[in-house]
Image (spheres, grey):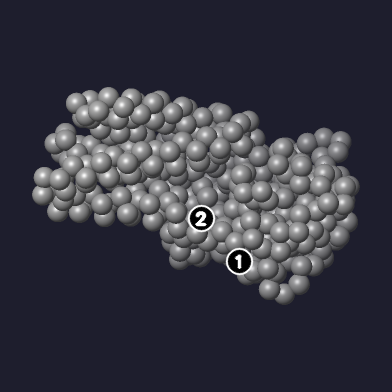
Amino acid sequence: MGATGALAAGAPAASSARIGTTWTWTWHQPHRAARRVWWLTALALNVTLLPLAVSGRATEASLAALLVAVLARHDALLSAVGRKIGARPGYRRHQLLNHLGQLHRAMALAAIGWLVLAATQHLARPPAVAVVLFILVIALLAMSWAARDAVRPTRHERFELIHRVVGWSALAVLIALVVQRFASAAATGRSAEMIPTLLLLAAVVAAVAQPWLSVRRLPVEVLEVTPGLVVLALPGQRRGGGFLWGSIEGREWHAFAVSTCGREGPDRFCLVIRRAGDWTERLGRRCEEGHPPTSLLVRTMRGYGFMGNARAYRQVLVIATGAGIGPVLLYLLDRRQPGLRCLWIARDHRATIGDALVDHVLAGGQTTLIDTTDARPDLGRLVTAAAPGTGAVFVVGNPGARDRVAAACADLGLRWYGPTFDS
């Protein structure tokens, strides 16, 4: 799950042209500029692969594009870069890191394109090879369609399953193609020509497999269950801005921010899980019925979330909705960000979140509760009233809340950070 750095500390630029009419960086829509950078980067990379592909080695071009796509979403790489960049001012760099997912998308699409070309180059081979390749291309195009921003929010679990199954299948077919070519080259005494291809394939396999080799089954304790969330405690280090992937049964995997609730004890961290989807609701019901999970499969290789960039600012305003308070708790309860102020928006906090967690949050004096039982607040007015003196605004909530906060920040010329499918 990144961004780009910031302009030098000081007064923000007064205004800029509307997105769509300029290629310059803008305060109100910096993510658009970051996305353009990554798509242009992908275009440049694929131009360099073009001679390789048209010379009959489209399989290698597909592997190279796939390697870049995988590395652009590799948790270890993003976490290492994020920890170094996120703690320093640099809004443009932060946005580039937060939207690195666009490079992943662009290079994945390029890998599919080169694979189509590879399929045409294999038409003279056994017909079964071409048939398998074209079936795989259709599956990859279906995966790309399911990955659209308009589809993923409502079909997220289906997307994750399709992405995983089709992605691994594509890699398996590429491995088979390379092995077949190596066998043919070895039979004619030209196996040395295949060494660069084998090294490229090994790099792709290692990059894909490494995060899954870090999976461990960790003991888990359920600390709290409310109508709105489930709080789990696990052994490990607490680090702001980090997230990990977890699963109970090993089939469905979900990303959760590393957090705290103030009650898990030393050498442990919390996952504050919002009961919003099928998987999380089943987890909540299990806990309520007295059959909580005793362990959780966890990819111990952690990712880097946009909240990690809060360390780059002395004064931060956070808008959190409901269980979106989870990623903010490390900053509030561990006192790691004295200059952080939080507006926590939810429906009847104590009924949906629980008295214990609400009391812990309020004890720090940095949080204001905003109850939506009677009416939803005007987020634009809230940001306008609370933003003076703020270095950046962070919003942890649904896309609607994010977009309203972003619009208010645009009017005020403020830096803002929020969740996207790129991060």
Position of residue 157 measured from the top left corner of the image (x, y, whole percent): 61, 37
Q: Quadrant of residue 356?
A: bottom right
Type of amino acid at the residue the image marks with label 1: Arg
Can residue 417 be spotted in the picture? Answer: yes
125 on left or right of 148: left
Position of residue 29 measured from the top left corner of the image (x, y, whole percent): 48, 40
* Residue found farthest to the bottom: 266
Foreground of the two, 25 or 203: 203
Foreground of the two, 78 or 292: 292
141 on left or right of 300: left
377 on left or right of 121: right
* Residue beneath the point at 63% across and 30% down: 154
Structural crowding at the residue carrying mark 2, measured as other residues with C-alpha within 10 Å and reported as few (<14), some (14–19) or many (≥20): few
The numbered dot on residue 239 is 1
Badge 2 is on which residue?
A: 212
* Residue beneath the point at 39% across and 30% down: 136
Q: Quadrant of residue 63?
A: top left
Can residue 86 be spotted in the picture? Answer: no
* Residue beneath the point at 68% across and 73% down: 267
* Residue found farthest to the left: 189
* Residue beneath the point at 20% across and 54% down: 195
